[in-house]
Amino acid sequence: MNTVNQTFDWSRFVSTLHKELVENKRALIITVVSIYVLLTFVMTCGNAIAYSSNTLLDQLWSYVPQKTVYTILLIVMAVGASLSFRSLKRKTSRAAMFSSPSSTLEKFLANVLIYVVGLFVAFLACAQLADLTRIGILTLYGHDIQVIGTINFMNLIHDTVLGTGTGAANVPGFNWAAWLSLVAVPGLYVLGSIVWPRLSLLKTFVASQAITIALSIIVSNLVNLFIPDEQFDNWMISHLDNGSFANGFAIFMAIQAVLFWGLAWYLFKRKDVVSLKWWK
């Protein structure tokens, strides 16, 4: 078990944060630049394709750009979170991490701040910059293409939910669920990075999908066993209309967020230099 102290000191935390940033600045810069290039490519091609297929207005009214960027954001958050504790892969890097004077709490928070919170802020900045780049590129080279104005991605969650077309933006539960997913998804992949430092992204994705499929099959069989299809359909429609389904989904996402982050912190405290096994 890791016996490093669990206290928090601000100066040590800043030093730990600075150390992580300096040691991994090249990888972080490449990550941010890659996000910017990807978003620029998607936005530019999306604008050009939507216009050429005469569906630009439909795409805008249904908030396709926001929904696309939100999906990319979830993927980026998962990838970033899966890299947060990649130093656990090798014994020498684990020794360097756990022998540093900072506490376990400071190490954990520093990595979360950089690879989850920092990446989220960087993504929003890249989205706005990529949107401006799209306008510049299409204005200069796409003379026959209608270039839409800037999109405010600071309203990303609200616009994404609004684009569902069911009046979901007026149901607080859907907005909460969308925000909480940005907490739960990184929590899951931070947990995976701690449990499986090697090939963390792949292993966590496969494990989460296997569990999701298994639970879906179990729940579906139970529903079919006890509730007739027509009665279940009416129940779903009524709960979608009154917002209780959205609130329930938000609660489910909140439970996942607490569970994933709680397990991540608990298991990180139990890591040591010698063994990577979570039960040690």
Image (tube, rainbow, N blue to C red):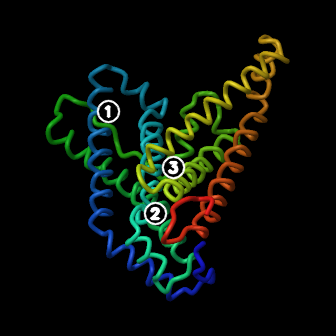
Q: CA distance from mark 1 to mark 2?
A: 35 Å
- Depth check: 159 or 67 in front? 67
Q: Which quadrant holds the C terminus?
A: bottom right
Label 1 is placed on what type of residue? Gly
Disc with the residue nearer the chain's start (3 vs 2):
2
- The circle drawn on residue 155 is 3
- Depth check: 72 or 12 in front? 12
- Going by the image, does 115 lie left or right of 239? left
Label 3 is placed on what type of residue? Asn
Q: Are marks 3 and 1 in contact (CB under 8 Å)?
A: no
Residue 228 % position (x, y): 82, 12
Q: Nearer the viewer, mark 3 or mark 2?
A: 2
Element at badge 3? Answer: helix
Few, some or many residues within 10 Å of mark 2 (<14, 14–19, 20+): many
Residue 169 % position (x, y): 63, 39
Up/down of 63 relative to 178, above or below = above
Q: Which quadrant holds the N terminus?
A: bottom right
Q: Residue at x 70, y 42 (%)?
A: 173
- The circle drawn on residue 130 is none
Residue 187 % position (x, y): 57, 55
Q: Residue at x 42, y 53 (%)?
A: 198
The residue that disc 2 covers is 85
- Is residue 264 at all visible to an observer of this figure? yes
- Going by the image, does 99 lie left or right of 213? left
Label 2 is placed on what type of residue? Phe
The residue that disc 1 covers is 46
